[in-house]
Amino acid sequence: MELIDLIPNSMSFRVVTTLDIHDEAEIPTTFTGRVRRHDAEHIIYVAWYKAGELDNPGRNYPAYRRFRPDGRLKYELFYTHGLLHDPGAATPAARGYFADGRVHYEERYWAGKRSDGKDGTPAIRKWRQDGTLRHELHYADGRRLRLDEVSMVRRIR
């Protein structure tokens, strides 16, 4: 079903087309707007599209948010023109959460390729449920770096 919503935008409103679907085949190939996928009695995900590609509706709001059956956020993904892309230096393109809401993992991307942050933050960081760091992996332009390459890349930057 297609709806038209008015969403507050600073001091005005913007009109947004919203599709409530049960199957991805219901999304038109060049769709622009918000998609909410439902399963039984809850929302599985909310995705924002621009010309058929996932695209953040705003700088601080992700293009894709997946929810747990209880409604809590499971993970969120930031996209620019259909590619995973960090929206800013402090925000990774992908972030997953434990059921209690604490961060489980973060992944950094630049134009769809895993890459360390400009400040040297590893492309992948994963935490244990107790909050301790489980592991970090470094990438450059989509390629995983060996440990000796990480220090070389840091010296070049």
Image (cartoon, rainbow, N blue to C red):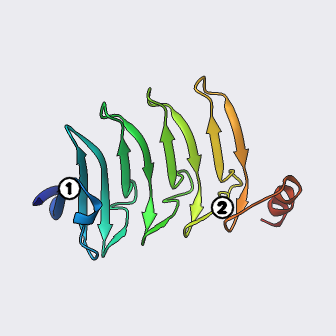
Residue at the disc numbered 1? 21
Whole-number angstrom distance, CA of label 1 to CA of label 2: 34 Å
Residue drawn 30% across the image and 34% down it:
71
Q: Position of residue 43 (x, y in %)?
A: 25, 43
Q: Which of 58 and 99 is in front in this view?
A: 99
The residue drawn where x is 20% and y is 55% is 21
Q: Which residue is drawn at 37% across and 66% down?
A: 55
The percent coordinates of residue 45 (x first, y second) are 31, 49
- Report which quarter residue 151 is drawn in: bottom right
Say which amino acid is labelled 2. Answer: Ser
In the visual, does 66 lie left or right of 17?
right
Split into 4 quadrants, where in the image is the C terminus? bottom right
Q: Is residue 77 left or right of residue 132?
A: left
Contact? badges 1 and 2 (CB < 8 Å): no
Q: Label 2, secondary structure: give it.
A: loop
**Along the viewing direction, whichever of 145 and 9 lies nearer the viewer:** 145
Q: Which amino acid does label 1 sit on?
A: Ile
- Asked whether, in this view, residue 95 is left or right of residue 138, the answer is left
Mark 1 vs 2, N-terminal side: 1
Q: In this view, does 67 lie above or below 17?
A: above
Quadrant location of the N terminus in the rendered image = bottom left
Q: Is mark 1 on a helix, strand or loop?
A: strand
Image quadrant assignment for residue 113:
bottom right
**Mark number for residue 115?**
2
Q: Which residue is drawn at 58% across and 51% down?
A: 107
